[in-house]
Amino acid sequence: MKIAVLPGDGIGPEIVGQTIKVLEALKLNMSFEHAPVGGAAYDLTGEPLPAATLAAARRADAVLFGAVGGPQYDNLPRAKRPEQAILGLRKELGLFANLRPAIVYPELAGASAIKPEIVAGLDILILRELTGDIYFGQPRGIRQLPNGDREGFDTMHYSESEVRRIAHAGFRAAMKRSKRLCSVDKANVLETSQLWRDVVTALAAEYPEVELSHMYVDNAAMQLIRNPKQFDVMVTGNLFGDILSDEASMLTGSIGMLPSAALDEKGKGLYEPIHGSAPDIAGKNLANPLATMLSAAMMLRYSLDQEAAAAKIEAAVRKVLASGLRTPDIYQPGTQKVGTVEMGAAVVAALS
Ligand code: NAD
């Protein structure tokens, strides 16, 4: 199993470093090829996604990604910014389906900003389409109007085949869980969403066991706070999914706990924590490495067909949480505060 390892910027190298230790401790037949990405790659080569990094990602069976970005890169032209590397990898590798679980571990229910009774036991999966929508639509730009005013504009669009592909992924995921799928759109206002809803509705005939519902995105944003456990699998477009999955992440109390996967049609994927490069805590041994470790577990499950090893990592994470160890982002009085390195060592120890 060949893994391309792209640690990136900020806390990326710290959390990925600990995760590699966990993967090595599993003693599977895995090889790791490291490559720079994001700001680190820009500093070395002038490009956030150098051709050699893209080639390593193409060669690999799966990609383990840390995070990219930092204030020192914020004034670069858009094409050179670290975040372009993620968009480029998604596009070049055809990673169209973003799987974002939001799970509330019993020990962390009190860490959520929402009342524990609303979130305890939460286990939902948000599927976000990743390669279409307004993020990639043309034309886009900022133009000068005849009256001297400036205008920014973007184009939202989805083709029928793009919707069908992500909807199939949503129905398949629902079949593996509690057979409930909620499709989120804004069909009361947007033509793109009307087509989305029509296509998803038509597809439901192929999955008679799945109970399909539709919800407008504004209501979905509200329902995720009011009663998140009503959902099982949610499927939505790129823009709405970006926002809703971040919202769902906060139900769990820490952005440092949530893994994600971006898959192509054959199941090859890029695995990364949902958080960014956290420049405010980079290099201080403060970052929570658990989201990256749980991303590695998803990698074992979805791309490498190693369910037992995936479950082993997840069990080790639960064991460490149950033992009371916490990085500062999930610390509560009565638990024991540890750093990135100590948390990594504890998960490795809990594997055996
Ligand atoms: P962020 O996710 O990096 O940080 C938000 C807050 O959460 C910060 O206070 C940070 O310290 C904390 N945090 C994040 N991950 C943590 C972890 N593992 N453990 C403990 N605390 C953690 O978001 P931001 O501050 O908006 O962005 C910082 C940079 O990251 C920007 O350049 C942004 O563009 C980039 N970014 C990258 C990705 C990615 O690589 N996929 C995603 C989002 C943001």
Image (cartoon, rainbow, N blue to C red):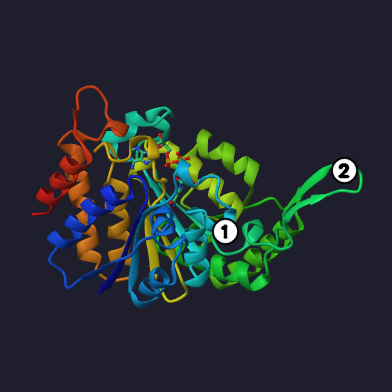
Count of marks, rendered view: 2
Task: Choose between 31 and 130: the one closer to the eye.
Answer: 31
Give the residue at x 39% y 39%: 279
Q: In which quarter of the image is the N terminus?
A: bottom left
Q: Do the residues labelled 1 and 2 touch (CB within 8 Å)?
A: no
Amino acid type of disc 2? Gly
Left or right relative to 24: residue 11: right
Residue 124 image point, x, y percent: 43, 49
Please state the quadrant of the image where ligand 1 appears: top left
Residue 151 in picture, x, y percent from top left:
79, 46
Instruction: Say which residue appears at 52% left-offset and 53% top-offset.
Output: 81
Provide the secondary structure element on which disc 1 rests: helix
In front here: 93 or 304? 93
- Identify the mark at residue 79; answer none if there is no mark: 1
Q: How crowded is mark 2: few (under 14 residues within 10 Å), some or many (20 or more)?
A: few
What separation in Å lies between label 1 and label 2 (alpha carbons)?
A: 27 Å
Q: Mark 2 points at which residue?
A: 148
Q: Which amino acid does label 1 sit on?
A: Ala
Residue 209 in sight from this viewpoint: no
Q: Do we see residue 11 in this rendering?
A: yes
